Image (cartoon, grey):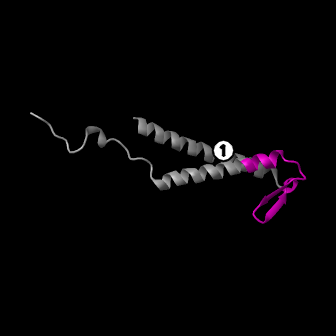
Amino acid sequence: METRYDTTPDEETREAAPSTWQRFVKQLLAIFGAIAVFLGLFIMFAGDNQSLGIFDATWQVGDIADEWAYGLLIGGGLVLVGVFAWILQGISRRRS
């Protein structure tokens, strides 16, 4: 007696590759996280007479509160850790 499958047995448990929007969101979050970490480090270690400009707005680094540096570092770091965990989760699901 022969058993015929419409699909292979592994096909039902296998997950699809991440969609385009998921890859886009991962990349966007990684970029924003990296920028936040960079800005936090710049605020912490740049001289007080340095200026920081984003588009048309500029600030003297000495006028920016230290809490902004720590907030950007912590927030950007958490975003990068989240993206890294998301990537590892996708890799481990594809392997199993």
86 over 56 or under it: above or below = above
Residue at 49 percent across and 56 percent down: it is: 21
Q: Amino acid at mark 1?
A: Gly
Kindly give the residue lying farthest to the right in the view shown. 49
| Quadrant where the image shows the C terminus | top left
Res. 75 in view: no
Give residue 74's position: percent from left, percent from top. 69, 46
Residue at 82 percent across and 62 percent down: it is: 58
What is the magenta range?
38-63
- State the residue position of label 1: 77
Give residue 32's position: percent from left, percent from top. 65, 53
Give residue 68's position: percent from left, percent from top. 76, 52
Give residue 45's position: percent from left, percent from top. 83, 44
In depth, the one of 55 and 60 nearer the eye is 55
- Residue 41 placement, left or right of 3: right
- Residue 47 painted magenta: yes
Residue at 75 percent across and 50 percent down: it is: 39
| Quadrant where the image shows the N terminus | top left
* Location of residue 64 (image quadrant): bottom right
In depth, the one of 36 and 64 nearer the eye is 36
- Residue 34 placement, left or right of 57: left
Kindly give the residue lying farthest to the left in the view shown. 1
91 over 52 or under it: above or below = above
